[in-house]
Image (cartoon, helix red, strand yellow):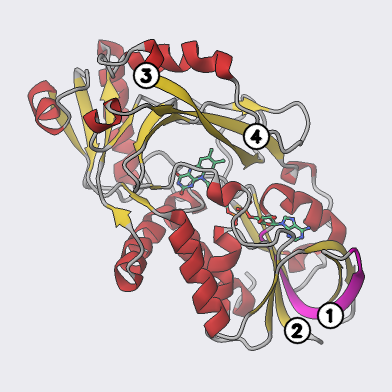
Amino acid sequence: MDSDITIIGAGVIGLAIAEKVSESHKNVFLIEKHLSFGQETSSRNSEVIHAGIYYTKDSLKARLCLEGKRLLYDYCRKYNIPFNNCGKLIVATSENEISIIKGIQQTAIQNGVDDLIIIDRKQIAEMEPNIFALKAIYSPSTGIVDSHSLMKQYETNSINNGVQIVYGSELTGIKKLNNGYEITVLDSDGRNYTFTSHIIINSAGLTSDKVSEMAGIYDDNLKILFCKGEYFRLNPPKNKLINRLIYPVPHHNMEGIGIHVTIDMGGGVKLGPDVKYLESNVYDYKLTASKQEAFYKSVKKFLPFLGFEDISPEMAGIRPKIQKPGEPLRDFYIKEESKRGFPGFINLIGMESPGLTSSISIANYVNGLISNPD
Ligand SMILES: Cc1cc2nc3c(=O)[nH]c(=O)nc-3n(C[C@H](O)[C@H](O)[C@H](O)COP(=O)(O)OP(=O)(O)OC[C@H]3O[C@@H](n4cnc5c(N)ncnc54)[C@H](O)[C@@H]3O)c2cc1C
């Protein structure tokens, strides 16, 4: 075999995996179709280090988020990656929502998030004097991270461990062999080349279902639906009126967690993302200026100082959802596919939020699957 392990996709998850597996494996390749890392979902998100509050008990999302959050804070301290453990408030703006936030606290406790506290109007005013809320949950372990610096560090450590990162090369075919796989790649000069790999790790984000199909794994349950999220920015100087993350009470089936307010490491404040399943899987990052009214109304409930002109379109990202519209929340799909007849093929599909938060714990989990596929 030309390589022991080939990872497809240099987003935050593929890079974290590359760093981890190269600590104990030689001959690791990372193939990325763009000319540098993180050009898709990993650079179009809220950059929040999630606490692990909302996920289904015993799910991978719950477990890997909780573990990943701790590992990520440690990693950021170790490598001086900019981060801010700023905390977050989930705000109830009506009597009805007060009972919902109590339920959220219970779910969080079941997931091992035991540091949430419910605070009243006076305590809210001390933390965030400019918002409106009757009651709120305060999550002290939530934070934000500079995701570009994080990916750069994963890349640097991977290269130092000997990983060969091949940018500008798109995986176009996978053929199963007796003891591994033959991989075909199209490079940026339009040339095809092939090589062999004992193990393939599919962390191809929005097209990870297609990569899985290239190997011969067809499963309707793993079809990715592109689900767009748009953001508006809170224009200066009003961005200075918010100090931490402010979330509304989430939708019942968690297709999204409501238009929320996030701060970033540069002092910017974003509103969003909203949730819109696209009709087909196209890379549609266009911004919809006409959504201004809906964004404004949605956050005005808890940002009373907001004027209609205080927000402008900012950016959009696309979630790789395997949860169909209206369905209950789906978990991350992370599996070694021996049971389907594809030993050494590891699939990561539906890696939506909290994928950034969980990147290191996901990498550890995948590394474990290499030695122990069950
Ligand atoms: C709107 C939005 C907000 C989010 N907010 C948060 C948040 O606040 N906190 C959090 O924890 N998570 C958040 N997430 C989730 C997080 O961004 C993702 O879980 C994470 O970025 C996924 O990383 P990835 O490496 O799997 O995918 P990607 O970043 O999509 O990387 C996959 C890579 O694979 C490459 N690729 C695909 N096909 C091929 C091929 N055939 N050949 C070669 N290369 C290929 C792509 O070019 C891409 O670079 C958010 C997501 C969205 C969309």
Magenta range is 190-203
- Cβ atoms under marks 3 and 2 closer than 8 Å: no
Which quadrant, please, contains the N terminus?
A: bottom right
| Residue pointed to by mark 3 | 310
Task: Look at the image and tell me whether residue 31 can be seen.
Answer: yes
- Crowdedness of circle 1 by 10 Å Cα count: few (<14), some, many (20+)? many
Q: Position of residue 39 (x, y in %)?
A: 62, 52
The amino acid beneath tag 2 is Ser
Q: In this rendering, does residue 364 appear at all?
A: no
Q: Quadrant of the C terminus?
A: bottom right
Asked if ligand 1 lies within 8 A of label 2, the reply is: no
Q: Residue 107 appears in which quarter of the rendering?
A: top left
Horizontally, is 261 left or right of 124 in the view? right
Q: Give the mark, 3 or 2, whose residue is nearer the N terminus.
A: 2
Amino acid on which the number 3 mark rests in the picture: Asp
Mark 2 and mark 4 in contact? Answer it, CB < 8 Å.
no
Q: Which mark is residue 297?
A: none
In 3D space, how far apart are the residues under numbered discs 3 and 2 (Cα atoms)? Answer: 53 Å
Residue named by callout 4: 285
- Tag 1 residue: 196
